Image: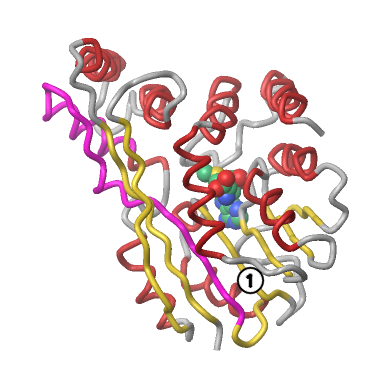
Amino acid sequence: MTESAVRAIATGLARAGQLSSVVGVAMLEFDEAAARNLDRTYATPDIVAQRAAVLALLDLQPGERVVDIGSGPGYLLASMADAVGPGGTVHGVDPSPPMNGLAQARAGDRDWVHITEGDALALPLPGRSVDVAVSTQVYEYVADIPAALAELRRVLRPGGRVLLLDTDWDSVVWHVTDRARHARVMAAWEEHLAHPRLPRTLAGLLRRAGFTVNGQHVIPLFNPELHEDTYSANIMQLIARFVPGRQGVTAEDAQGWSADVRARAAEGEYFFSVNRYCVLAAAP
Ligand SMILES: C[S@@+](CC[C@H](N)C(=O)[O-])C[C@H]1O[C@@H](n2cnc3c(N)ncnc32)[C@H](O)[C@@H]1O
């Protein structure tokens, strides 16, 4: 299926209101606008480059059996399927049926891709059945990380590889004039997930779960200009919609914050960066 056809499905699903629980209702609720935002955000050059970095670190080989935990709309899933080829398998596992629909459409006729509704805490796979486990921007939403890592260990074959990627929201640098309001907005935004600073603890958690940690990497996203095809332009809209009513942030605060950020761009001094962190590990 072509990329534009998948985008049309994303918009249709969103219109039908089926994407309201993409990342967990208690945290980040995905309505129609947010669903469109997600599909756009993942297609920006920033996230395309992030996926290329992940694929380079993974170094997938033809014939490998891969699980993508929280496969979402399936961009990475489809690329991994091309890397392992028809002699391999890629399992996408995600609790969201609408996301799984998008991933299935993106996988197209690659019949070595299998997408199943499921959760990081109860993977629908037999023990020791995969060579490589990947989870990007998912564990930060999972409350019980030790339980998720125990489940990861169960499905990996001995020596199987793991790549986990998450954001540390302390790494955000965003040029604004009202830094106090910005701090309140970012504190409210942290409510969108369970672990806003997961990466700094993940290597230790993996070791305690019995894995060998083989490397940690930073993947910076950097927008020195604001335009609509950037990660920060898209995430700014999500943040402004999410924060009112949390941590004392009002709708006026959220609007004022967006206007502050946009004013910096209008004055030619836009500046945004955030870090993703990847940890590579191996099962015992
Ligand atoms: C920010 S998206 C990331 C999607 C994809 N991994 C990527 O990087 O493009 C988070 C995804 O995690 C999924 N998710 C949330 N909680 C999960 C859980 N407990 N187990 C598995 N997936 C989960 C959501 O449904 C959503 O598709």
Residue 142: percent from the left, percent from the top?
A: 50, 57
- Classify 146 as above or below 197: below
Residue 5: percent from the left, percent from the top?
A: 77, 25
Q: Does residue 43 appear left or right of residue 50 in this picture? A: right
Residue 158 within the magenta-colored segment of the rendering = no
Q: Does residue 88 appear left or right of residue 70 in this picture? A: right
Q: Dividing the picture into quarters, in which one does residue 246 lie?
A: top left
Residue under the image location 41 percent in, 52 percent down:
194
Q: Which range of residues does the magenta coloring cover?
A: 160-189
Q: Which residue is mark 1?
A: 132
Q: Secondary structure at mark 1?
A: strand
| Mark 1 residue crowding within 10 angstroms, few (<14) / some (14–19) / many (20+) | many
Q: Dividing the picture into quarters, in which one does residue 16 lie?
A: top right
Task: Give 128 or 56, whichever is nearer the viewer.
Answer: 56
Q: What colour scheme does the image use?
A: secondary structure
Residue under the image location 62 percent in, 59 percent down:
69
